[in-house]
Amino acid sequence: MPTSEVTGRERPSCPTRSITATEQPTLPRDRLFLPRTDCSAERGDAITRACAGTVLWLSLLVVSYWWAADGGIRDLGAMATALMSGGRLAGLVSADLLLVQVVLIARIPVLERAFGQDRLIGLHRVVGLTSFTLMITHVSAITFGYAGGDVLATPAMVWELTADYPGMLLAVVGTALLLMVVITSVRPIRERLRYESWHLLHLYGYLGVGLVLPHQLWTGQEFLGSTAATLYWWTLWILAAAAVLVWRIGLPLWRSVRHSLRVAAVVPEADGVVSVYISGRNLDRLPIAAGQFCNWRFLGRRGWTRANPYSLSAAPDGRHLRISIKALGDNSARTQTLHPGTPILFEGPYGRLSPRARSRRKVALVGAGVGVTPLRALAEGLDYTPGEAVLLLRYTERPLFVAEFHALARERGLQILWLPGPRRRADSWLGAGMSDIDDLTALTGWVPDIADRDIYVCGPKSWTDAVRRTTRAAGVPDAQLHTENFRW
């Protein structure tokens, strides 16, 4: 099985303008990049995104219409009724968005392909925070309205509503669980938690959503006001629950059983970094592409119930998969000691950092540190001719996959620019080994046609943001910039 042995002789000591092939193999025509095929996929993804946005706005319009038809606007005339009416509208929109955020993270394949998980998670956060804010508004306005606008009577009304109204106690518990999820999702708090701990706490959000449901269906005026409204809400809840059961639970289990993945070998790549080679059944039927990632669980060891996202670091060949992992936490550190034969459960594949997102013949791969892993797979898996693909890799001490990149340069014509050293400044994505030249001048000097390329970027979020600023300044449209941050 191939390994990546990096020797001192192979390690570049300074930035290299490019390393090109001395022998140019001829690719079969059926493997050449065909812009029409990829553009067709991108057009389909754009249509999916447009349809998803349209469905969202239509759903908000429908619930707003029912609120208005039930006297919502008429009730705005007096303070107490205005509080009640505004609270009902806030609750309706909150409930609608609550289901939307569940769907966004249900791993529905058509949405994953169209948006990419990185973008879906960002949308999930915005929608979730909006939904929770409206939920608190709903609770406050309804309670204050029932109390007749009397602040002193509000605490007693809170107790009365909780104790006497069907499903309200469950709703209070559900709201508390959702509050915990929101608090632990605030960046300063989230960054203090291990991924495994945060993920476990976040799963309580599903329980919170489920506990809120009885209150809405038993006592909600707009839920029970008409047969159409009742049917609408029941349909939405059933579809959201089915999406989670089918695509977050059922499909991963089915694929794990079908392909029976196991660890084939663990190969050291660098200090704290190993590559895990994975074997299984019918891997040629697993719909995974270079650059994508899965959430992996290695069974039979401590912490196996907690999944971690790792990208492929080699293009899938139908016989083996390879992921490369740096020891950054408890689970990733345990990966260093995996044994051949260890069974694997997985979810995925996910991500748009893949050939599917490509819309230009030329590409640029820009990575930092262990973020080079999906770019290594793309450098192998993308179709390109000599000069059409360039890799810009920043590394602190020792770059990964040097021998393999050299082989791709010889055999495929991949151009390579090494960017040594830690980041020279917080607002720069270049290494400290570079001169004082600004980022934009450096990028356009190395890759003059950068605006005509698709750019695949993987690295820490702040570093990726610096790359994004530079590419925008260079005239690269956002549609040609494809990123993966593995944020949580």
Image (cartoon, helix red, strand yellow):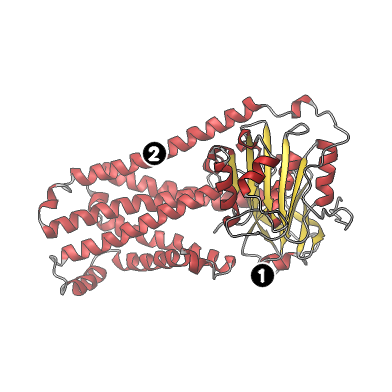
Amino acid identity at mark 2: Val
User: Where residue 143 sits in the image (x, y, percent)?
Assistant: 21, 65
Mark nearer the N terminus (2 vs 1) = 2
Which picture quadrant has residue 29?
top right
> Label 1: few (<14), some or many (≥20) within 10 Å?
few
Q: Nearer the viewer, residue 273 or 181?
A: 273
77 to the left or right of 337: left
For image coordinates 76% across by 31% down, the residue present is: 385
Amino acid identity at mark 1: Asp
For image coordinates 61% across by 51% down, the residue present is: 252
User: Where residue 201 sits in the image (x, y, percent)?
Assistant: 50, 67
Discs 2, 1 touching: Cβ within 8 Å: no
> Label 2: few (<14), some or many (≥20) within 10 Å?
few
For disc 2, the marked residue is: 55
For disc 1, the marked residue is: 330
User: Where residue 325 sits in the image (x, y, percent)?
Assistant: 72, 59
Asked which secondary structure carries label 1, the reply is helix
**Quadrant in which the C terminus appears:** bottom right
Q: Nearer the viewer, residue 195 or 349?
A: 195
Asked which secondary structure carries label 2, the reply is helix
